[in-house]
């Protein structure tokens, strides 16, 4: 009986693997592994604890794959999928703009995007041309890129926080022929001069005076769209399919200028559909989208549920912690999005009745720190956290489908090759891949931190890697001879660790650890502890070099807008909460800590300035080990440390 069960399990796994597109060789190996594994008590133990989770994941994978195969066979793309959604829900609210209360039904959104398509065709733009969109979040932004896509024109979604050189770089790297900007960003447009080698037609949307339009050599877009036909245009020729470019989304640029990631139609569908099925969203859900629409979380995970699944999405112009729950109550939202530090910002707000009177059951996003996970769900009565991991361009996204606290996703331990991702060993100082005697990457065992990679297969819409507009940037994210000889894999750049059950936990982005007193210090872990001690304020932790001292000393930049920071009470708190090697040697007290548009703390400038008091007006403190207290840093003390006349 035991042998029969083993054979049945191995044959069953073989069939499932072939169904989701795994090669015969890997399927046979996995089937053999199951057969052998079922003869091990540890296998039974892991299977008993994870079978339901893994089967759910397999169901989601199969459902998305089958839908993609169907759309690819039919020659579909995102505009044609949206057309099907409009037929199902013609009069249902599609997008609600929180700033004005305006509502667009699916028919109205379709007609507005048709007007955009006619306008684009009248400009002489053809399939493959690029138009930059530079505006704060609003439903029109969705209609613009969707309408452009209807005639094969690709949008470049520009971060509305960018100015001067970064803004010029992002528009230039996409090869845009024109730019559409919001009137609220007219000042930013006046600060950039596009090179004569790249003529740039400009259009402005929103309330704007004729003088401003004249100064910027821009045309007013709103009347042009109002007068354009709302009837559908025939598809572009040649028509764009699921593996053709839809638009560009830019990396956050925390370490250098942003890169333009290519988003093809199949990638847009895949990301949105995985979010919908993995976290069990419903057709009648109303989703609160307070994330910027130039980012994949806001525009794909969020708006994608509207365009593909027919959900109503509330678009918030900019995130507001004080208005968050009131907005959810006003619009009867059942799903909310978060990213980065949003959950911590909400926890830092005063307690108010609205935070428990809402109908929200699901919060979906990434970057929720384990230190605030349970506090967030308990205080705001959120039944489900839909945490996931993945970058816009990556092929190794993972999702936490069963609410395991702290985990950003999982990979099956029973059938690991169903989804060909892996944690591989790296030198954490250089992030160089560790190779074995055959030249292949070394897989990590449970408990060992490693770099997350995903095998590339350009023929598979779930495994393809489309890279960036810049080919050099694309090549840097591809490794060879990873799983086997002559294969290629996408390098995520992120270090994770997997437990015995296959749950994966985010460790640190490249460079977010430092070594001090012979110990490795995780900046994200220390940031979470310090932020909790300080009432969930913004904290950035990083290592700084000190002459003639091994390793890097810890430094913490702390936001103190009320100017009430107390060094003495802070030191007493961290002495109880942190081991000596993890306590910040230097403090930098600032009115605020710089973050990206998606609430990632920016450390590049902080690390560059270090603890030199001449480079900032912020107050810097030094933890004097002899006096056992934080002392204000002045130029004399700085020189004493730099000349190695002060012991750390």
Image (spheres, grey):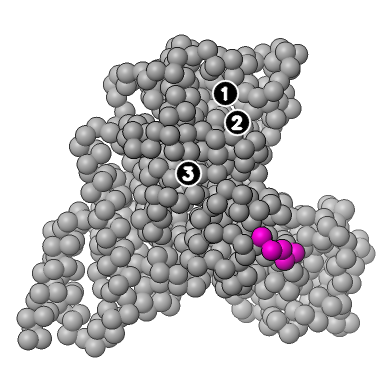
Label 1 residue SS: strand
Mark carried by residue 179: 1
Quadrant position of the N terminus in the picture: bottom left
Name the disc covering residue 134, or none. Answer: 2
Question: Which residue occupies 69% across, 63% down?
Answer: 353
| CA distance for labels 3 and 2 | 24 Å
Magenta portion: prevailing SS class: loop
Q: Is residue 613 within the magenta segment?
A: no
Q: Earlier in the sequence, mark 3 or mark 2?
A: 2
Kindly indicate the quadrant of the structure image that contains residue 554.
bottom right
Q: Secondary structure at mark 3?
A: strand
Whether residues under marks 3 and 2 lie with C-beta atoms below 8 angstroms apart, the answer is no
Residue at image location 87% in from the left, 71% down from the top: 566
Q: Give x and y (percent) for residue 615.
A: 83, 52
Q: Tell me if mark 2 has few (under 14), some (14-19) or many (20+) residues whose alpha carbon lies within 10 angstroms of its own.
A: many
Q: Are marks 1 and 2 in contact (CB under 8 Å)?
A: yes
Disc 1 to disc 2, how far (Cα)? 7 Å
Task: Say which of marks 3 and 2 sits in front.
Answer: 3
Closer to the eye: label 3 or 1: 3
Q: Which residues are magenta?
A: 350-354
Label 3 sits on residue = 312
């Amino acid at each position: 009986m035991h042998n029969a069960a083993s054979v049945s399990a191995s044959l069953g796994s073989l069939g499932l693997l072939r169904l989701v597109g795994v090669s015969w060789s890997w399927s046979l190996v996995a089937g053999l592994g199951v057969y052998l594994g079922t003869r091990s008590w540890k296998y039974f133990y892991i299977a008993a604890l994870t079978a339901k989770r893994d089967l759910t994941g397999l169901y989601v994978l199969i459902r998305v794959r089958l839908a993609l195969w169907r759309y690819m066979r039919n020659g579909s793309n995102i505009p044609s999928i949206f057309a099907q959604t409009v037929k199902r829900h013609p009069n249902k609210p599609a997008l609600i703009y929180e700033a004005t209360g305006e509502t667009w039904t699916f028919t109205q959104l379709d007609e507005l995007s048709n007007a955009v398509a006619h306008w684009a065709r009248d400009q002489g733009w053809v399939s493959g041309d690029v138009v930059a969109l530079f505006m704060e979040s609003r439903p029109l932004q969705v209609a613009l890129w969707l309408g452009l896509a209807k005639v094969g024109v690709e949008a470049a979604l520009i971060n509305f926080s960018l100015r001067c050189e970064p803004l010029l770089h992002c528009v230039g790297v996409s090869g845009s022929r024109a730019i559409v900007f919001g009137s609220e960003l007219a000042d930013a447009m006046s600060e950039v001069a596009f090179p004569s080698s790249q003529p740039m037609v400009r259009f402005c949307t929103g309330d704007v005076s004729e003088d401003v339009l004249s100064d910027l050599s821009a045309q007013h877009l709103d009347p042009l769209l109002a007068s354009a036909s709302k009837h559908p245009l025939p598809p572009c020729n040649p028509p764009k399919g699921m593996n053709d470019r839809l638009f560009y989304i830019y990396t956050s640029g925390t370490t250098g200028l942003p890169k333009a990631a290519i988003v093809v139609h199949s990638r847009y569908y895949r990301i949105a559909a995985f979010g919908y099925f993995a976290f069990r969203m419903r057709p009648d859900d109303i989703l609160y989208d307070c994330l910027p629409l130039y980012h994949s979380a806001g525009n794909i995970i969020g708006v994608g549920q509207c365009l593909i699944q027919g959900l109503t999405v509330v678009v918030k112009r900019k995130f507001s912690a004080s208005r968050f729950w009131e907005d959810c109550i006003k619009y009867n939202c059942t799903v909310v999005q978060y990213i980065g530090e949003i959950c911590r910002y909400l926890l830092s707000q005063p307690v108010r009745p609205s935070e428990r009177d809402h109908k929200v059951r699901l919060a979906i996003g990434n970057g929720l720190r384990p230190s605030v996970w349970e506090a967030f769900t308990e205080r705001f009565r959120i039944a489900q956290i839909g945490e996931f991991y993945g970058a816009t361009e990556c092929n190794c996204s993972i999702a936490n489908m069963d609410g395991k606290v702290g985990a950003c996703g999982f990979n099956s331990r029973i059938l690991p090759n169903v989804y060909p991702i892996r944690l591989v060993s790296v030198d954490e100082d250089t992030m160089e891949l560790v190779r074995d005697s055959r030249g292949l990457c070394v897989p990590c065992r449970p408990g060992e931190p490693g770099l997350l990679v995903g095998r590339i297969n350009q023929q598979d819409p779930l495994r393809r890697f489309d890279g960036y507009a810049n080919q050099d940037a694309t090549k840097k994210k591809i490794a060879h001879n990873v799983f086997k000889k002559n294969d290629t894999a996408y390098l995520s750049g992120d270090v994770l660790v997997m437990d015995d059950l296959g749950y994966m936990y985010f460790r640190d982005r490249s460079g977010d650890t430092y070594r001090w007193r012979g110990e490795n210090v995780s900046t994200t872990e220390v940031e979470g502890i310090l932020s909790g001690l300080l009432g969930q304020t913004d904290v950035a932790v990083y290592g700084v070099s000190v002459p003639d001292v091994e390793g890097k000393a810890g430094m913490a930049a702390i936001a103190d807008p009320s100017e009430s920071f107390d060094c003495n009470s802070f030191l007493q708190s961290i002495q109880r909460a942190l081991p000596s090697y993890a306590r910040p040697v230097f403090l930098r007290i600032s009115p605020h800590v710089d973050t990206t548009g998606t609430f990632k703390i920016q450390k590049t400038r902080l690390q560059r300035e270090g603890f030199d008091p001449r480079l900032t007006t912020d107050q810097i403190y030094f933890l004097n080990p002899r006096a056992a207290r934080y002392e204000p840093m002045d130029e004399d003390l700085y020189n004493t440390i730099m000349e190695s006349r002060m012991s750390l």
